[in-house]
Amino acid sequence: MSTASVRPVAEPDGYRPVTAADLGPGQSRCLPEAGIIVARGQDGQYYAVQRQCSHAALDLDGGRVRGASIVCPHHGARFDLKSGRVLGPPAYAPIAAFPTRVRDDMVEVWIYA
Ligand code: FES
């Protein structure tokens, strides 16, 4: 797993706004500059995970959100959006998951390198 493309921008409390909080449940948005996917689970919560799938290092952009998980569009691995852990093969390694919050209609993510 690599989070080398993730570049944190220091805020006093470590969070930074990354995108508008206008996603509907089950939608996601790729943020290439941050190397992350922001997704809104069908539970209504916002999540952020690394963009790169741990299976073959391909892009999770375009993956379907199911419940509070995301399914890789390439070979179907499924990851828990809360923790990044693997929920379904062929991946076996987790992906990075980042804390989120919503403030002023923006999704803020605490990104570590
Ligand atoms: S690259 Fe994601 S499951 Fe293969």
Image (cartoon, rainbow, N blue to C red):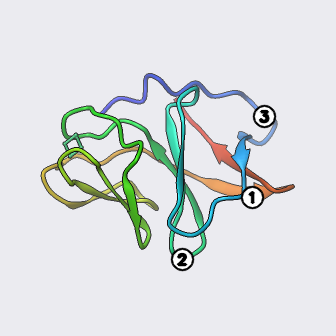
Residue 40 percent location from the top left of the image? 56, 62
Answer with the quadrant where ligand 1 appears in the image.
top left
Res 11 label? 3
Label 2 residue SS: loop
Going from the N terminus, do you reach mark 3 or mark 2 first? 3
Q: Residue at x 26, y 40 (%)?
A: 54
Q: Residue at x 50, y 31 (%)?
A: 35
Q: Quadrant of residue 95?
A: top left
Q: Residue furthest left?
A: 90
Vertical relation: 1 (above or below) 63 = above
Instruction: Indicate left or right for 14 with 93 as reference.
Output: right
Residue 93 percent location from the top left of the image? 22, 46
Q: Quadrant of residue 96?
A: top left
Residue type, label 2: Asp
Residue 13 percent location from the top left of the image? 77, 42
Category of crowding for the residue at label 2, using alpha-carbon neighbours closer than 10 angstroms: few (below 14), some (14–19), many (at least 20): few
Q: Residue at x 47, y 47 (%)?
A: 49
Label 3 residue SS: loop
The residue wearing badge 2 is 43
Res 102 label? 1
Tell me whether the residue at label 1 lies in contact with that at label 2, contact meaning CB atoms closer than 8 angstroms. no
Category of crowding for the residue at label 3, using alpha-carbon neighbours closer than 10 angstroms: few (below 14), some (14–19), many (at least 20): few
Residue type, label 3: Glu
- The span from disc 3 to disc 1 (Cα, nearest Å) is 15 Å
Label 1 residue SS: strand
Residue 4 percent location from the top left of the image? 43, 22
- In front of the other: label 3 or label 1? 1
91 vs 22, nearest the viewer: 22
